[in-house]
Image (cartoon, coloured by chain):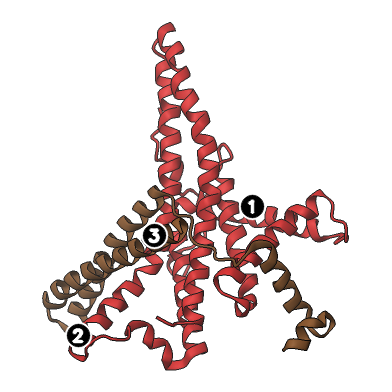
Amino acid sequence: MASPIEQFNIKPIAHFELAGIDVSFTNSSLWMVIVVALLSLFLIGGTRKSASVPGRWQVMVELMYSFIAGMIRDNVGKEGKQYFPFIFTLFVFVLGLNLAGMVPYAFTVTSHIAVNFAMAAFIFIGVTLVGFAKNGAGYLKLFAPSGVPMWLLPMIVLIELISYCTRPISLSVRLFANMLAGHIMMKVFAGFILSLAAAGAVGMVGAVLPFTVNVLLTGLEILVACLQAYVFTILTCIYLNDAMHPAH
Amino acid sequence: MGDKKDNPKQQTFEERLSQAQLKVQGTPEAKEPDSASNVAFRMGVDLVAGTGVGAFMGYWFDIWFDTKPLFLIALLILGFVAGVRNVVRLARQVQDADEADEQ
């Protein structure tokens, strides 16, 4: 029986090396390319006609657009609109990767912390730069809450700074852990089916149980895939809001 | 402002759109979806992440300033404090949201 974590192995497809660093095109990169291609097809295809009375395809794309536009308006405000392209790309990319992981034999790119942390670190640095660009040195007030006595201030600033630095970790670990745990669980229950079925007639009847669980898990995992993409995006919006209006 | 509101043509399309949306949806305030397990998971990650970031920063400060293990110990403790602060802040958010729902 295959090990439940074997599905997360990175396998190089085409080997490249750049200045001594392994930059091979792997199965992870392959699935990113596939997802980006499918998303482009979906979004460009849906907006191709741009009819005032939209067809089904166009409605799907428009729903996605208004969902993210609404999220930005509610969480960041009107000024957040300029970041719409980034937030929208982030959402559809993470959602696409999560959902692509549900396809049998597919590779779940977001189950690797390296990928998620790269995205989270990019968001973290970007949001910090936006904060300084919009507020100048006033952004530092985020680290010094008002009403703190002078002698306590250095420690509070340090604590707030560490707390600020936990953001990319909290952001990436949540997506990574959810995807990893879900896919391991599905694989483990699939393993139960096989080993029970191999144990004779009684086992075959018993194998119905883990099979039922796996069917339910598949539904749950699709929900988790969408929910975690949503959480990732909305947290980015919340951080962005902190950067634009650092009042607290 | 008064006559501007009376005559919709003088308002920008943006303003009219957001007013219409306010009428339909009420004041929108989206939050993170906070199911109990989601909140619990987030608290756990926040707590560990604070300690982890503190330890990481301390480790590298010690290497840069050659002060082993001064910064590691100090920042480990401060990191834990930061983690607890994150959890308390999150708990307060959840509580405020719950109280707002009850009213």
**Mark 3 chain:** B
Cα separation between marks 1 and 2: 53 Å
Rendered image quadrant of residue A4: top left
Horizontal relation, residue B81 to residue A185: left or right: left
Task: Establish if A230 lies above or below A245.
Answer: above
Task: Establish if A119 lies above or below A31.
Answer: below
Question: Which residue position is annotated with label 1?
Answer: A34
Name the front one of labels 1 and 3.
Answer: 3
**Mark 1 chain:** A
State the mark number for residue A152: 2
Quadrant containing the N terminus of chain B is bottom right
Asked if badge 1 and badge 3 are on a common chain, one would say no
Cα separation between marks 3 and 2: 27 Å
Task: Establish if A146 lies above or below A74.
Answer: below
User: What x and y, as percent, mark residue A132?
Assistant: 46, 87
Residue at (39% x, 40% y) in the render: A5
Q: Is residue A209 among what the camera can see?
A: yes
Label 1, residues with CA under 10 Å away: few <14, some 14-19, many ≥20: some
- Secondary structure of the residue carrying numbered label 1: helix
Q: Amino acid at mark 1?
A: Ile
